[in-house]
Amino acid sequence: MAVAEPNAPTPAVPPLTLHCPACDNHYALQDLAWRCADCHGVLELSGFTPAFPKPADLARRAPTLWRYAEALPLAEPAAITLGEGMTPLVTAPGRPDVRLKVDYLMPTGSFKDRGAVLLAALADNLTVGRMIADSSGNAGTAIAAYAARAGIACEVYVPESTSAGKVAQLRAYGATVHQIPGSREDTADAAAQAADEPGTLYASHVHNPFFFHGTKTYVFELWEQLGGRLPHTLVLPVGNGTLVLGAHLGARELLAAGLIGHLPRIVAVQAASCAPLATAFQAGQDKPATITAEPTLAEGIAIARPARGTQILAAIHSTGGSITTVTDDQVAAAHAALARAGLYVEPTGAACWAAISAGLVGEPDTAPDPDLPFAVAPLCGSGLKSKPPTS
């Protein structure tokens, strides 16, 4: 067996870069690039090889998402973290074969804290003076909170229709709020223009791949909470796909580490009145369909032009999953049912439960494992942020 020389240099660790898969361009993190300069395509993180902590190490660590330090591309930001992660897993009302992960118990009231803390840590590491985000509410409030912790100026662009509770939360964190008339896409366009100003980190939960390395911890926690296994089906909301892509990434990393034997099936849920991904999936297309969006109670997933739509469709196909839609009436009914079971979510947070309750998720092809739930769905955002549904 070869023995390393005592004074042999430590192998160099490749630097983290942002990579355009279409053009093969690489950008240093310090460039603050948020899309490819040539093709305007989305960027991926390159130069990072994740590992997974040993069970003995996990047993000694705090119940936060930073317990998976080896699998995250940035070190825990001690002065920024709010203890995010390890949210409860509870039995769904009337469905002992389904679990609900209560991610609205995150510090700012939504699952977006998982990715926002990574973006704030990145901004802090790069010593940028300004962060910009666009959001229908939850991603913006999460980024504003962690920017406040980091002492970084933050501007958040939101649709004019964003609920007053979310706007108030943004302002309470000290963020400058820009309320943009028109569609969710108009809001994203306005933020993108501001994001190109020098010294600005576009803390986009859609474009910045560090965000997905935060949301992948949703699956890591499930794996731990279910005794080192994952359920047959992950039911996930999808608009811009931040949780679908993060969950798919996390499951792939668990599979590569030999910690699970196969990928769980992903069933994604869209609002029926704004469903470019479901429309494309049902038509067998590999790109989001062109649609005319209509208003919906599920404002958090009302995305007519998801920038990573092709990736989302490919991820769901790779698991043997599907994309379904729910109506506003179904969302309202699910919202009320969850509240009567002690779970008060924003309307978007009821979309997955609406799909399960309506029988839109399907059943496993093989006999279910009696020791595992058939499906797990997230409760993504607190109901205290939004007006209750009126549909």
Image (cartoon, grey):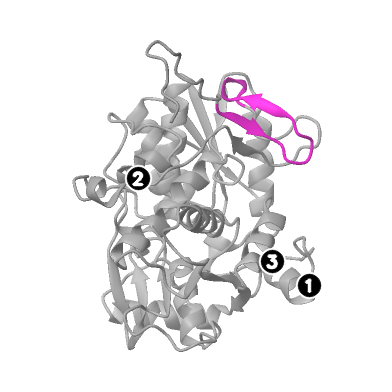
Q: Is residue 168 above or below residue 283?
A: above
| Category of crowding for the residue at label 1, using alpha-carbon neighbours closer than 10 angstroms: few (below 14), some (14–19), many (at least 20) | few
Magenta part of the chain = 16-32
Q: Is residue 24 highlighted in magenta? A: yes
Percent coordinates x, y for residue 370 in the rendering = 34, 85
Q: 312 and 326: which one is in front? A: 312
Is label 2 in a helix, a strand or a loop?
Answer: helix
Q: CA distance from mark 2 to mark 1?
A: 37 Å
Q: CA distance from mark 3 to mark 2?
A: 31 Å
Residue at image point 44% right, 54% down: 164
Q: Is residue 209 highlighted in magenta? A: no
- Using the image, tell me which numbered label, if any, was put on residue 277: 3
- Name the kind of residue labelled 3 in the image: Leu
Report which residue position mark 2 lands on: 68
* Earlier-in-chain disc, 3 versus 2: 2
| Number of callouts | 3
Report which residue position mark 1 lands on: 284
Percent coordinates x, y for residue 345 in the rendering = 37, 67
Q: 79 and 386: which one is in front? A: 79
Q: Is residue 53 above or below residue 345?
A: above
Percent coordinates x, y for residue 246 in the rendering = 51, 53
- Using the image, tell me which numbered label, if any, was put on residue 48: none
* Earlier-in-chain disc, 2 versus 1: 2
Residue at image point 47% right, 41% down: 50
Q: CA distance from mark 1 to mark 3?
A: 10 Å
